Amino acid sequence: MGKEIPGKLLLDASTVLMPCGRKIDAEVYIHLKGYARARVSHLDVEKMGLGKVIRRGRGNFLEIKGVENGLEVVLREKCQIILNREEFTVSSIVIACPLLNKVVEKGELTRAWVGRKYDGIYIGFRKAELEKLEKLALENFGMKPLKKLQSQPQM
């Protein structure tokens, strides 16, 4: 992502496609409610082509596992995607960032809405995890979600 957007907080994270174990150069953000049209706070994983892991419609409720130093998004079924002209079989995506264990602890399981977007995927957590995500943003970045959605500037 070229420019900094208020309310999108870049995490020091790495993203790995499983089962091949291939690390990809995705950017991971906490996107807070009210900023840049976000209706709820969520996690963005941005890498052109990554959205193809969501096959039908705009998203699915998927299992999210807390793993060592992060979380794993388990897809419903294996799929083939192409990133940087390379083809990969993907059954899950590991997002390695120790801060994310404050949202989903190691060994914990939950379900979340994982949606497809133009440049990747987003993870919309349930209320319990959402509150932890927003607390993490406040404690580590000093930012809170906005009560009202911020209007977009007119061009």
Image: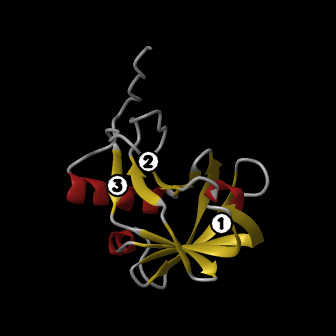
Q: Describe the element under mark 1 as helix, strand or loop.
A: strand
Tag 1 and tag 3, C-beta contact below 8 Å: no
Where residue 62 sits: x, y (%)? Answer: 65, 66
The amino acid beneath tag 1 is: Leu
**Disc with the residue nearer the chain's start (1 vs 2):** 2
The quadrant in which residue 93 appears is bottom right
Q: Of marks 1 and 3, which one's residue comes earlier in the chain?
A: 3
Residue under label 3, please give it: 10
Q: Is residue 82 left or right of residue 25?
A: right
Above or below for 2 versus 66: above
Residue lying farthest to the front in this orientation? 85
Q: Nearer the viewer, residue 15 or 126?
A: 15
* Disc 2: which residue: 41
Badge 2 local density, few (<14 within 10 Å), some, or many (20+)?
Answer: many
Q: Which mark is residue 27?
A: none
Q: Residue at x 35, y 40 (%)?
A: 3
Mark 2: secondary structure: loop
Q: Residue at x 71, y 47 (%)?
A: 58
149 is higher (above) or lower (below) than 123: above
Amino acid type at image mark 2: Ser
The image shows residue 59, relative to residue 65, as above or below, that is above
Looking at the rendered structure, the secondary structure element under dot 3 is: strand
Mark-to-mark CA distance, 3 and 2:
14 Å
The C terminus lies in which quarter of the figure? top left
- Picture coordinates of residue 78 (x, y %)? 76, 74
Of 127 and 142, which appears nearest the observer? 142
Q: Where does residue 111 sit, x and y in percent of width and height? A: 60, 67
Residue under label 1: 62
